[in-house]
Image (cartoon, rainbow, N blue to C red):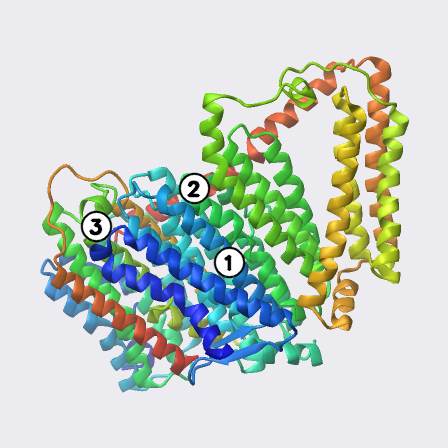
Amino acid sequence: MNMEQLIIVVAVLPIFSALLIQLFSKRIGRGAARLSVVMTTLGFLLSSLLLAWALTGHAPQALSLGDSSAIMLFDPLGTLLATIILGISLIVHLYSVRYMAEEAAYGQFFVLLDLMTAALLFMVVAGDLITLVIAWYLVGVLLYFLLGQDTRSQTAYRFAFWTLITYRIGDLPLILAAALLYNAYDTWSLTFIFNEIMANPHAHQILGFSLTQVVAALVGLAAFARSAQFLLHTWLPYTMDGPTPVSALMHAGIVNAGGFLINRFAPVFVNGGDVLNWVFVVGLVTAIFGSLLMLTQNDIKKALGYSTMGQMGFMIMECGIGAFSLAIYHMFAHGVFKGTMFLSAGGVINSARQDDGIPKDELYTFAVEKQPKKARKPWVLMAAITLAVPLVILVFAHLLIAEDYFQKQGAVILLFFGWVTGAQLIFATYRMRSQNIWRMVGLSVLSLVIVVLGYVFISHAFDLFLYPDAAFRAQLYTTASIDILRFDVLVVITTLIIVSGWFITYYNEQSGYRQRQQSKRLWLNFYALISREFYIIDIYTRLTRTLLAISSRLNVWLRWL
Amino acid sequence: MTESMIILFAGVFLPLFPMSMIFNAVLDNIKQPWLKVVLFIAWPLCGLFIVSFSGVAIPDWVIALALFTSILYALRMLSLREVNQWNGFLATSLWSLLWLAAITDTPEMLLYGYALSMTVPLVLLVMLSAGLEKRFGAAYTGLYGGLARTIPRFSGVLVTVIVAAIATPLFPTFFIMFDLVVETVSIMPMAAMALLLIWLLWSWAGTRVIQGLIVGRASNVKIADFGIPIIGFYSIVLLGLAVAGIYMARVIL
């Protein structure tokens, strides 16, 4: 079997599996699950083979399906993501074999799961706009039915509908972008279009704007809807009534599609002017709001939902700073991590009912029993660590990776973000008043070093694999860069926020944590706002009801004709 | 007869508001399912025949009115609960877009192909709605629900037919809509935006019908589900429709 045949087999296996189960589900009964698992395992092994082939430096393969305009493109991005999708799908399949055993539509569930795997595969290996749009669209439709697996549950369907309508809102800009590109370049082939754009980025105009910029903005919008960015996020934390394997698949794979889409259209974004800066802003706002909302949830699955929203914000933000390949790594790492959390959530809840299992260590006494005690290290020392560690990492990155690493705004923002997170971690450690404070500090610093250095090195490795052209990589970072003065002002503001955090802590300690009445009220109002999830869902509900009322009124006026 | 009169007359069959109300009034008064099927197939073909036979030039105001009609009926579908009425409104919303296809360089025979392939899922829905009336006395969403548990085969077909009707891949209406967006986006960007809005409203209305019928607890009363031959019939038609969609994609895109 040659590589071309292998590629087709990988893409077609899940469809073949779904078809077999649909046709023979009565005869094979529970064997449907085994069949599906075997097919997915086979698909995963074959795609791993393709990935190994790509890793050894073989050129990307583009296969035309018959004499149609459909093309399957096995480039590094497609091959890597196909393997990840099949890997996560295999884990979800294995988990579902027993988890879904009591469900009435057991066979149908595996049909839908296989079709979803196929749609995701076709999405990542699509080499033409039609296949991409079809796969992109079908993912939303299939997810709707997977989330509504329990047909008795009105709630499951209600939130599955939220997902579908948000996804449909995201489909529309992609369709528009595809239509614009076809009109301009008279081909559906992505490779051809991207080559033309790279050769002459602003050859076409639409309504007085550069077509490349308009398409980048439209693709960005499609990615925002799919990856639950702020204002298009409400579906994500509420779709928890679907089966747990579907939640895992959704949070580990499907929701990451926004990052994939931006990567697929990298040649458009690299010539898309300010669009990447807007992508960064949207990602940043989502990361902040997602994390804030996650902290206030008392439902484990909803908290995980908002955590995913925050992570998606971070992933989109990475694209916004030009770290495209890092977003792919983030997608993979978050997929594995969040998938594991969802699949083990039920087990954790179950064992927590028997025994809370929390060791009565420093963390427990601080977080649960609210008993701050023991000595803690001086304020100045902890603040100094916050400043010293990132500086050391920056120097390391400078020496080990690239001489000009320091000069890349994207890399600096990334490290800066690592610093902000690390500062928060060290700050929390400081407040914990541990018995073994050095151990705690050591672990915090170590995690910070691993996270930031890991990101730097892995980002570099992914960069080399996904974007081997050094000039293109440099162009990505350059496009994402902003005016140096604005950049410096933003860095100073963020630094001031962190430093003032330390000063407020110092002031509070000196004044014995006496809170003024006014600040207490302000804090409570802020908490109320977060607990209502910024009233976004209430606003959407009101808008929906208004639209339905208009529809009803029109029907009455026009006598239902 | 002046050109405007011809267009107004054609506007009864390729719905233009307010002439579009005639089709829905006729549909409302027909009780026999087979007559409804004939009406659904013949109505848009009559409209296309009038337009092509008369050779009338389609003015811009007709396109604007056709888009308005399509949006109006798509919006009104959101609050409908009677399946026959919903089907009629969807037909009105779909067929009015044939005006848009008629002004592009779509060959005449392909236009008839558009009309027919748009109508096949609606015809299937007529038959399914008759099946619902036979089993429950009415084809009404939110009235009984739980069809997925009570009559799983029937509801499987129902869901697929609705999905096909609201322009989902790989069914022909999806590719027709895609083609219309491609044809209009550069010359009439506002029309392309309107098409996308209509598409979104169909999806919304479609999911409301699906949820109103299939979701809920199973009925305690035993109700006859589809047998294998009927399932086979619907499967073949739907498969044929998907194949037609793929073929159409190769021809028009």
Q: Where is mark 2, residue-wise?
A: A244
Pinpoint residue B219: horizontal percent, then vertical percent. Answer: 17, 39
Write the residue at 52% across / 53% down. Answer: A253
Write the residue at 11% across / 65% down. Answer: B34
**In the picture provided, is A308 more to the left or to the right than B178?**
right
Earlier along the polypeptide chain: callout 2 or callout 1?
1
Q: Secondary structure at mark 1?
A: helix
- Report the disc number at residue A85: 1
Q: Where is mark 3, residue-wise?
A: B152
Query: What separation in Å lies between label 1 and label 3 (alpha carbons)?
Result: 31 Å
Q: Is residue B185 visible?
A: no
Query: What separation in Å lies between label 3 and label 2 (alpha carbons)?
Result: 23 Å
- Callout 3: residue from which chain? B
As drawn, A151 above or below B155: above
- Callout 2: residue from which chain? A
- Judging depth in this view, the residue of A399 and B31 nearest the camera is A399
Q: Is residue A13 visible?
A: yes
Q: Label 2 neighbourhood size at 10 Å, few (<14), some (14-19), many (20+)?
A: many
Write the residue at 82% across / 20% down. Answer: A376
- Report the disc number at residue A474: none
Query: Quadrant location of residue B216?
Result: top left
Query: What separation in Å lies between label 2 and label 1 (alpha carbons)?
Result: 17 Å
Type of residue at label 1?
A: Ile
As drawn, A380 above or below A509: below
Q: Label 3 neighbourhood size at 10 Å, few (<14), some (14-19), many (20+)?
A: some
Dots 2, 1 in contact, CB < 8 A: no
Type of residue at label 3?
A: Pro
Query: Quadrant location of residue A399?
Result: bottom right
